[in-house]
Structure formats: structure tokens, C-alpha cells
Amino acid sequence: MLNKKIFLGNDAAYMTTYILDNIVNNQKKRPMIVIFPGGGYEFCSPREGEPIACEFNSMGYNAVVVNYTVNAPYPKALIDASNAIVYVREHAEEWNTDPNKIFVCGFSAGAHLAGSIGIMSKKENAIKRNDNMNKVNGMILCYPVITSGEFAHRGSFDAIEAKSTEILQKTSLELQVDENTPPAFIWHTFADEAVPMENSMLLAKAMRKHNIPFELHIYPDGVHGLALASEVTSDNGKYIVPHAQGWINLVKEWLNKCI
């Protein structure tokens, strides 16, 4: 296992690698999962980092966890996300990773960031490239912050200083979906009061409009921030919802169809 910290152009942003050993010669190259923890763009939640990477490792995927810049104006965190994807692709051969199977996985505000790099790589001048090195092949969005409109999680947009009409529209992801948007696996809970499930539904509606495939699951129970919804990511018994634990197995099935 290759496990190290890699800085992404500044002292605030870095990613930690969870790269599986290539123990068999000529082994098939592995997909890569690039993970963005949540935290309202104010911090990066450890509960949504390493435990998630370990789950994907157990499925045979390489993973990295990105600790992006927080409490900074847009598009600082998005530039960090782009740099992370580019770095992964540049090191795909070294890490026995398939450069055409790079998926992002984000939680809450981290899902907003994951969705932003997935949807905006060809649209946002700050990260636009002609070589597709920051292209995302699929998105796993867990109770995502999506909209800056009626159902917004205002704290997330305040943390990235999304105040002008232009930036609010740019960061409202349901308004940015187009034919270049990658497929997505999306899940949320009906009981989420911090980031209403309408965020996921607005994104799904926009993707349907543009004929972009997605899988959407709304679980009836569970507060915001479930992570794996199991003992592994619990906090003194909080965040354990047995029914919602099934999302990680559903993601594995979805990824098997994608790859």
C-alpha cells in the first residue's frame, strides 16, 4: 500500500494516497476514486475521508482523499480539485491506475466540490484545460450540496463567498449541467434537515433533461452526514442507520456497470 501526503500547489491543500500494491505482474489497471470529505467548506471531515478510502480499497480500487482549501473564496477549492485529478492522471502508470476510470466521490459540501469538477471542467476558466487531464469519468455524490437557490445550504455558499449573482449561478450545479456532464450515483435521506433532499432531486432533474444517466436513492431515515451510516463512521452512536448502509454496495454495483 502506498500511503503518503501530496501537496497540491499550496500549504493548505493536499491529498493522501491509498494506492493498493500491484502484487500480480500485468495486473489489470485499477479504477481510482478521488474522495472529497464534507464540512460546509469550513473544514474537511475525517469521518468522510480515510474510512471511505478503505471501503473502496476493499473493492479493489485505488483511492485518494483530498483535503482542499476551506474558508476561501470560489474557485480556490475547485482549483485544488482540478489539481488533484490532474496529479492522479499524471501518475496513473506509476499507480497502476486506469486513466479512463477516474471517479470522484464527495459528501455534502465535498459532493458540491466533486460535482463542480465533474460538471465544470470545460466551463470554468480557472480550471479549463485543452488536454482533458482534469476530466472526471463518473461522480458519486452523497447527500450533496447542489443548489444556491431555495433549498441551499447557505453556510457552504457563505464559506466560498458566493455572493454575486454570477457566482451564485455558477455554483448552483443544477444550472450548469450539460451534455459533457459525467454519469452520477446520488444518494440522500428524506430526513436530512441540513441539506434538503431537493438538492439531489434538482440535480437528477437537470441530468434527465440533458439525457445524462444517473442512479438516485432517497433513504427515509438518517440525519445529515451519515458517511457509511455504520459503526465505522459513527460518533458515539450517532450516524448509524442500518438501511442506509446499503449505499456503498449499490455504488459497487453502479461502478461495475460503469467500468
Image: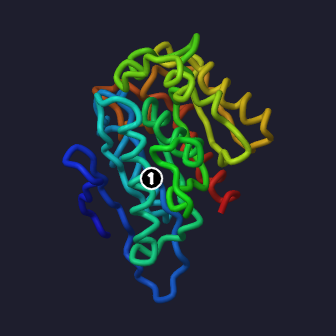
Q: Which residue is mark 1?
A: 34
Q: Residue at x 78, y 38 (%)?
A: 210
Q: Position of residue 67 (x, y in %)?
A: 31, 44
Q: Classify mark 1: helix, strand or loop.
A: strand
Residue situated furthest bottom in the rendering:
25
Residue flagged by tag 1: what amino acid is it?
Val
Q: Position of residue 135 (x, y in %)?
A: 56, 56
Q: Residue at x 65, y 28 (%)?
A: 175
Q: Residue at x 55, y 78 (%)?
A: 28
Q: Nearer the viewer, residue 75 or 16?
A: 75
User: Pointer 1: residues within 10 angstroms few (<14), some, or many (20+)?
Assistant: many
Q: Nearer the viewer, residue 42 or 119?
A: 119
| Image quadrant in which the N terminus is located | bottom left
Residue situated furthest top in the rendering:
150
Which image quadrant for residue 98? bottom right
Whether 241 is drawn above or below 79: the answer is above
Q: Is residue 183 visible?
A: no
